[in-house]
Amino acid sequence: MSLEAKSDGVQVWSDRLRLAGLRVTQPRLAVLKVVDHEPHIRADLVAVRVRAEIGAVSTQAVYDALNTLTAHHILRRFEPAGSSMRFEIGTGDNHHHLVCRRCGTVIDVACATEAIPCATPTDTNGFFVEEAEVTYWGTCPGCLELQDRASWPAADRTQPDLAPPA
């Protein structure tokens, strides 16, 4: 799928940038298209994809765009423990993330209580809590299947429709 096919188009992103009081620049538009196309993308991969989209652009320009778009709540940055920072389009829905410990797959999951914030500390120590960032960790279905298949006899590992031996 092309980036244009996934994105709502340059005009939508241009309007969103202007609404936030930002100038519309080629690097910012390219960053938005890339992150929209590939949610939960690492910053280093954003730079690679942006270069493929628009050609020569410095890593610093891409990181500046990521930081500016995050500061204006157009993008959301999150950093699963032990992982690089990742980006997604900011939706304001306070969703959380489920991360596979084996392959690093990240998926969105709804807030457990559907309230914002969903995890208010018992003592806020005077803070006004605006958001709770929750990361659930586990093993995705694909990795579980691979794990299960690894314990099968070698002849059965290539048969996707076979259930594990009883």
Image: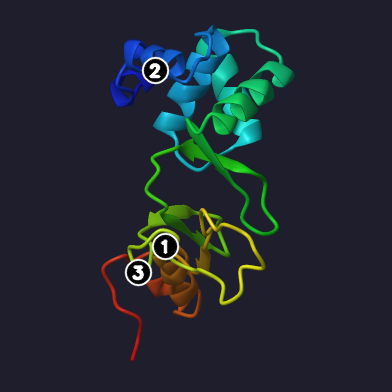
Label 2 sits on residue: 13
Give the crowd class for mark 1: few <14, some 14-19, many >=20 residues within 10 Å. few
Q: In terms of depth relative to the viewer, which is nearer, 87 or 155?
A: 87
In this picture the colour scheme is: rainbow
Q: Relative to 62, say whether 37 is above or below.
A: below
Of the two numbered discs 1 and 2 in the rendering, the one whose residue sits closer to the viewer: 2
Q: Amino acid at mark 1?
A: Gly
The residue at the point 44 percent across, 79 percent down is 152
- Quarter location, residue 87: top right
Q: In terms of depth relative to the viewer, which is nearer, 157 or 52?
A: 52
**Furthest-left residue in this view:** 161
Q: Secondary structure at mark 1?
A: helix
Of the two numbered discs 2 and 3 in the rendering, the one whose residue sits closer to the viewer: 3
List x then y, in percent, for residue 124: 61, 68
Mark 1 touches mark 2? (CB < 8 Å): no
Q: Say whether disc 1 or disc 3 marks the residue closer to the N-terminus.
A: 3
- Quarter location, residue 13: top left
Question: Where is the N terminus found, in terms of image quarters?
Answer: top left
Mark 2 touches mark 3? (CB < 8 Å): no
Label 1 sits on residue: 142
The residue at the point 42 percent across, 54 percent down is 107
Q: Secondary structure at mark 3?
A: loop
Q: Amino acid at mark 2?
A: Trp
Q: Amino acid at mark 3?
A: Thr
Q: In terms of depth relative to the viewer, which is nearer, 25 or 107?
A: 25
Q: Say whether disc 1 or disc 2 marks the residue closer to the N-terminus.
A: 2
Of the two numbered discs 1 and 3 in the rendering, the one whose residue sits closer to the viewer: 3
State the CA–CA distance, disc 1 to disc 2.
Answer: 34 Å
Label 3 sits on residue: 113
